């Protein structure tokens, strides 16, 4: 896990994006970009070389789950690690996200520690299977 | 009979039917079945007629009810506007807090680092001063420790304040759902008014202004800028201007 990795933060609430950006900065990740919807995020991912995607679920244009599926379906993006940070916490939704290939799932409200732990875990697993 | 669907003759007919069945009188049986059937139908039709009339009258009064017009034309759109404004207000408040936190965090980090960095040079200076700095020297040493420790505490509290702003996202999501619900109710209400209007042959509902209440008795609550009325003031300056024009 490289502290310079390029991270895209996607959430339709700008205040939440700002909080996540600050938390990532506290963890040493300064290379972040933002999008306010799955539909604006996808072209950004396709045109840039991102190493990590942090996304909400519930967004008006394209939802986070659809963004995840689109990422997994795109040959260039299919291996992108994806962390969902969302208020959605029904069993079926978590199962759907897991089956769609999400790497981590955080429910809101969350703590800074939880974010750190989940990010660490995601990259530990990726490095283990690399 | 008020409560019965079936009039009392039907019992009589039923008895006659049983007798005819027992006697094997097919013609009579058929005729009695017919009669019983017709009795039932006419009762049902009677009830149906009553219900239809009641429904007709309800729809009629509903359509012409000025309160319905007020709801669909003013109150519900206002309600959605207010809810949207709440989301805007919470966004502004959260951003203001985040501004303050984002500016304070680096200050506290700097304080911590500077204090830590001063400790060694300070001890050296004290040692070199050979007791000349003893009085205030102890205080300064304590101060350096205090600054470093307190800076850590400050950072923790500032981080808590940062995280707490997540309320804006969560409350905003909930409020958006309520707005959708209100919108759906509004659509249904408008549809119902339109439907009843078509049935009534286009009698127009009483306009919303017909239910305007004297504004002096209605408290408006916090100002929602897009809902400003003609006599709404727009802030402390407006209030002060008005008061001074009245001689205060």
Image (tube, rainbow, N blue to C red):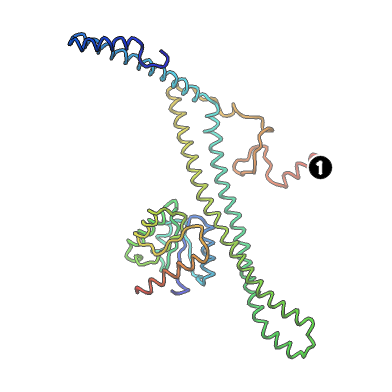
Residue situated in front as seen by the camera: A53 or B147? B147
Q: Identify the residue at horizontal 39%, vertical 66% (top origin).
A: A81
Give coordinates of residue A102: x percent, y percent: 38, 62
In the figure, B59 relative to A126: above or below? Answer: above
- For label 1, count other residues whose C-alpha is less than 10 Å away and answer few (under 14), some (14-19) or many (20+): few
Q: Position of residue A112 (x, y in %)?
A: 52, 65
B48 displayed left or right of B149: left
**Viewport quadrant of the C terminus of chain B:** top right
Residue B30, percent from left and from top:
21, 12
Residue A113 location (% of width, % of height): 51, 66
Query: Which residue is identified by label 1?
Result: B248
Q: Secondary structure at mark 1?
A: loop
* Farthest right residue in view: B247
Q: Quadrant of the N terminus of chain B?
A: top left
Using the image, determine if residue B114 lies above or below residue B154. below
User: For the image shown, how many numbered marks are present on the structure?
Assistant: 1
In the rendered image, which quarter is residue B75 located in? top right
Tag 1, which chain?
B
Q: Is residue B104 left or right of residue A17?
A: right
Determine the residue positioned at 39% across, 16% down.
Answer: B4
Residue sitting nearer the eye, B221 or A33: B221
């Amino acid at each position: 896990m490289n502290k310079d990795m390029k991270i895209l933060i996607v959430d339709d609430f700008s205040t939440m994006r700002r909080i996540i950006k600050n938390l990532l900065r506290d963890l040493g990740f300064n290379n972040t970009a933002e999008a306010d919807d799955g539909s604006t995020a996808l072209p950004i991912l396709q045109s840039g070389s991102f190493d990590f995607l942090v996304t909400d679920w519930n967004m008006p244009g394209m939802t986070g789950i659809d963004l995840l599926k689109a990422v997994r379906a795109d040959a260039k993006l299919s291996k992108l690690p994806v962390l969902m940070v969302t208020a959605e916490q029904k069993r079926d939704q978590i199962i759907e996200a897991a089956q769609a290939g999400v790497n981590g799932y955080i429910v809101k409200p969350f703590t800074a520690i939880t974010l750190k732990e989940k990010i660490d875990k995601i990259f530990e697993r990726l490095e283990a299977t690399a | 009979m008020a409560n019965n669907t079936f009039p009392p003759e039907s019992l009589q007919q039923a008895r006659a039917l049983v007798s005819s069945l027992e006697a094997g009188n097919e013609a009579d049986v058929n005729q009695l079945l017919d009669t019983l059937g017709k009795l039932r139908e006419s009762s049902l039709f009677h009830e149906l007629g009553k219900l239809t009339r009641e429904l007709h009258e309800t729809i009629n009064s509903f359509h012409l009810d000025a309160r319905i017009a007020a709801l669909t034309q003013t109150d519900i759109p206002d309600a959605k506007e207010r809810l949207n404004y709440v989301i805007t207000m919470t966004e502004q408040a959260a951003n203001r807090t985040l501004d303050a936190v984002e500016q304070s965090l680096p200050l506290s980090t700097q304080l911590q680092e500077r204090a830590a960095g001063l400790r060694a040079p300070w001890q050296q200076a004290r040692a070199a001063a050979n007791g000349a700095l003893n009085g205030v020297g102890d205080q300064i040493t304590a101060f350096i420790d205090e600054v470093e420790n307190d800076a850590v505490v400050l950072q923790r509290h500032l981080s808590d304040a940062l995280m707490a702003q997540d309320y804006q996202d969560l409350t905003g999501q909930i409020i958006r759902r309520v707005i959708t619900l209100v919108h759906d109710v509004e659509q249904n209400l408008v549809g119902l008014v339109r439907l009843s209007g078509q049935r009534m042959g286009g009698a127009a509902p009483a306009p919303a202004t017909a239910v305007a209440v004297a504004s002096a008795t209605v408290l408006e609550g916090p100002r929602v800028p897009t809902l400003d009325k003609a006599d709404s003031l727009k802030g402390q300056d407006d209030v002060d201007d008005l008061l001074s024009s009245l001689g205060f």
